Amino acid sequence: MTEHRDTVLTGLDDDTAVLHRISEDLTTKFTGIFAAETVERYVFESYTALARTSRIHTYLAATTARFAADRLKALAQAKGAIAHDVPEVLFVCVHNAGRSQLAAALLAKHARGAVNVRSAGSQPASELEPSIVAALAEAGVDLSLEFPKPLTDDVVRAADVVVTMGCGDSCPIYPGKQYLDWTIQDPAGADLAGARKIRDDIDLLVRELLTELTATQPENQ
């Protein structure tokens, strides 16, 4: 544990200049919404959170930029500072390496912009389940740019619907949100046949959820 913590701190020292550049870019993007100090705090917190589980340092700056940007967008949505014009769905499982990634990818594919989708894990893994990546590739979904993300308060606050899968009570509860719990087999270690079965089970639930979410939005059908 100490060795990994030291590695994270060393990486942070090495990437400080890059993280400052990311902070500057995001400060410009969120001009008038967040102060530079808030943006920088989110960037450095996001880097540290991802570095705890990341095995490959090469892409850590890029994933940090995406993660921090999405967290800031979620926070801005929750505060009403930017438009919240489509339903927001958050999928949560333990590792954000299988079920929640599957559900988020399939809903995004079917929704075609009619729903905004996020996913997170209460104890994020270091990488996605290979069988899940393969099963989604068969369905025409590319997960090559996705990565396990820790569950943060901001994305929960921004969500209209929170769907949990096997993560118990780790997700905070806020009023005015719809909470669903889907009983889905954990794909950890599953072969491709098992991953296909989980994919198809989730796909049925995702399609039902999309129908419910867009029932009052005929223009998005």
Image (cartoon, rainbow, N blue to C red):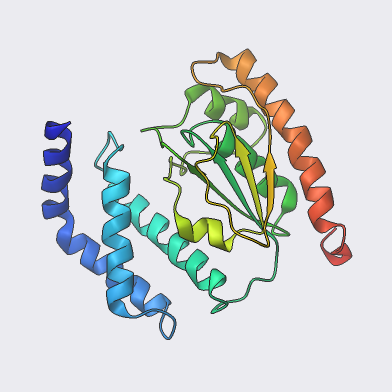
- Measured from the top left, where is residue 84 in percent x and y? 64, 71
Report whether 6 appears left or right of 157: left
Where is the C terminus found, in terms of image quarters? bottom right
- Measured from the top left, where is residue 47 in percent x and y? 28, 53
- Residue placed at 36% from the left, 71% from the top? 26
- Residue placed at 42% from the left, 63% from the top? 69
Report whether 63 appears left or right of 40: right
Splitting the image into 4 quarters, where does residue 83 fall?
bottom right
Placement of 188 over or under 30, stated as above or below: above
- Residue placed at 34% from the left, 80% from the top? 35
- Measured from the top left, where is residue 155 in percent x and y? 51, 57
Placement of 60 over or under 38, stated as above or below: above
Splitting the image into 4 quarters, where does residue 99 fall?
top right
- Measured from the top left, where is residue 7 in percent x and y? 14, 39
Where is the N terminus found, in terms of image quarters? top left
Would you say residue 142 is visible in this rendering?
A: no
Q: Nearer the viewer, residue 130 or 168?
A: 168
Q: Nearer the viewer, residue 24 or 160?
A: 160
